[in-house]
Amino acid sequence: MDDMQNNRTSLVKGAKDIAKEAKRQTSKNLGKAVDRAADEYSTHRSYNRFEDEEEDANNYHGYAANDGGGNYAGDNGTNEDEGASSDATEGHDDEDEIYEGEYQGVPAHNEGKLRDGQVALGQPVSDSLKSHKELETERQADEEELAQQYELIMQECGHGRFQWQLFFVLGLALMSDGVEVFVVGFVLPSAETDMCVPNSSAGWLGSIVYLGMMVGAFFWGGLSDRLGRKQCLLISMSVNGFFAFLSSFVQGYSMFLFCRMLSGFGIGGAVPIVFSYFAEVLAREKRGEHLSWLCMFWMIGGIYASAMAWAIIPHYGWSFSMGSAYQFHSWRVFVVVCALPCVSAVVALTFMPESPRFFLEMGKHDEAWMVLKQIHDTNMRARGEPERVFTVNRIKIPKQLDELVEMQNESANPVLKVLFKIKNELRAIWLTFMKCFDYPVRDNTLKLAAVWFTLSFGFYGLSVWFPDVIKHLQADEYASRVKIHNSERIEDFTFNFTLENQIHRNGMFLNDRFIGMKFKAVTFIESSFINCYFEDVTSVGSSFNNCTFVDSFFYNTDIDDAKLTNSRVINSSFHHNKTGCQMTFDDDYSAYWVYFVNFLGTLAVLPGNIVSALLMDKIGRLSMLGGSMVLSGISCFFLWFGTSESMMIFMLCLYNGLSISAWNSLDVVTAELYPTDRRGTGFGFCNALCKLAAVLGNLIFGSLVGITKAIPILLASSVLVCGGLVGLRLPDTRTNVLM
């Protein structure tokens, strides 16, 4: 009787235990459903389709019947019913529960088969049996899934204070690039004059800076896909600022060229990294417009450089010297001032985070989540909604493919280690660059390269040609006003004023005194100076050809053998001659005029910048790119009518205003066409081609100044129209998410 009673009690107890366990499972599943519905209701967005794999793992059955008895096999979630316990779970403590993401031991052999891409409990899926093509296919699928999810995340983060902060910081970096381009043209005449550069070496400064920018664009753009946008931009801008500042103090022309080349190498990374960086924190509907607004900082850099050159360089008094060996003229002050935007960008950039999209590409989920949360919280606080919670808790990570890296001996020389690391990084950059020519981005790379080259060739070529033509017209007009004096005889006269734009032939100067005066564009031909006295004399653009000096005395003048062409000096002496090439901008109307023309030409792009920013997402990138290039090419034909300075200035402003829309749309399209893992590399390659085309344009168009108008007009218009037609064949990226 007692045995029957005990069996009956055990049966009842077992039934109660089964009922409690079923109740606990039902309660838990119901709680999960309620929580999921609450999340979807509060955020109006669902990320569950990106979490299917993880949810399936969490809902694995924890209770199974075995031989008629209850057997609890474990659960991945938290025990929500603290009171639910039975003999089957006896000894199971709440503190010992296994939470999601914790190590859960090696799974049993007969457990369910996992999906592709899932990680078994305690043991990652081995990819050793998969081919490289299969792994690439899986990564591509992950990239597409991440792109969709990332777009939703950026929409939840919103567009606000964080993007505007980054906008101004990156704008300073882009402004530095614009300043660097204009600095070359503005300091070129002054630097070459100050350093006594012969005509055979003139012009190297412009080419060497563009060469540095070309190499820098490719190197820093590729490295940003390896080390990160922020880190590479910080290093490249620091290199630019340091060598730009150093170049203002060096005295030798070769050392000055070296410093400006390294300065250009540093600033070369600005354009590819800035646009890649900013595009990765913008939602799709904001990307075109705000990348176009960012382009305005390049224009601001040009205006800043023109205004500073106008205000500083012609002021010869803004200089000092330490003996005759060290001269610090006003153009060097201008170089220092132009380095300030770069220094400001470096300081501001240290307070900004890395691109979250780059973190995700590198598999750094937690770092990316923290940055995205920072973006969300910053924008929500600025909106007055600090209570809004960042609801994203899991983001898709692309499959990380293993790289074969050659290892270096730990005991090797530190210098060899550094060189070995540099070698590996360069090799990785090259491999990433070659991926830009893989399907399906190969055709896009070739088309972008053609558009970048043609637009840059026409733009930079005409940008050099316009000012040179204006200066040529000025020189012709200046030469038409020259005063010619023949067979004059001047005796016992004191010259203490400036002689300008004159030619003296067969003159005779007897017992004359030239004191504290200037020769400016004055030429003496077959003239004689007998018993004359020269003191504190400066000669700019002046020479003495086939002249004779007898019993003359020179003190503190710059008249030397270079200015005495085929002249005879008889019983004359030179004392305390001025060394080096003398510079003066006093009453130099042409210097002010050149800076003012560049200022107007740069300011003329403002309307084009505004129009392109407002219409970029409305009419499309490709329509704006192709239309702007074709219209710019057509406008070149109006150069036939440029017979005066005012007409050429008008044509310069018109051309710049039309072409700026093409530059803005090309920057946007390039940033959107390349996937994240090669965006910096592809952009850097295109920008390097841009600088190569600039060098070729400067050389070709510069050699045609004063010779013919037909070739520059036909060449510029043809390349711009052809480039615009190629640009229309690019894929439209207006509705694309960032891959």
Image: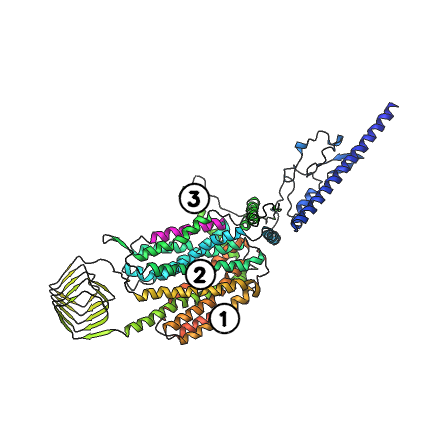
Which quadrant: the N terminus? top right
Task: Choose mark 2 or mark 1, whichever is in front.
Answer: 2
588 on left or right of 394: left
254 on left or right of 678: left
**Residue 309 part of the magenta-drawn span:** no
Mark nearer the N terminus (1 vs 3): 3
526 on left or right of 594: left
Residues drawn in magenta? 227-248
- Give whichever of 23, 122 is nearer the camera: 23
Residue that badge 2 annotates: 299
At mark 1, the secondary structure is helix
**Residue 455 position within the rendered picture, expressed as x and y whole percent measured from the top left:** 46, 66
**Residue 241 part of the magenta-drawn span:** yes
Q: Amino acid at mark 2?
A: Met
Residue that badge 1 annotates: 630
Q: Residue at x 85, y 28 (%)?
A: 8
At mark 3, the secondary structure is helix
Q: Residue furthest front?
A: 384
Q: Amino acid at mark 3?
A: Lys
User: CA–CA distance between discs 2 and 1?
Assistant: 22 Å
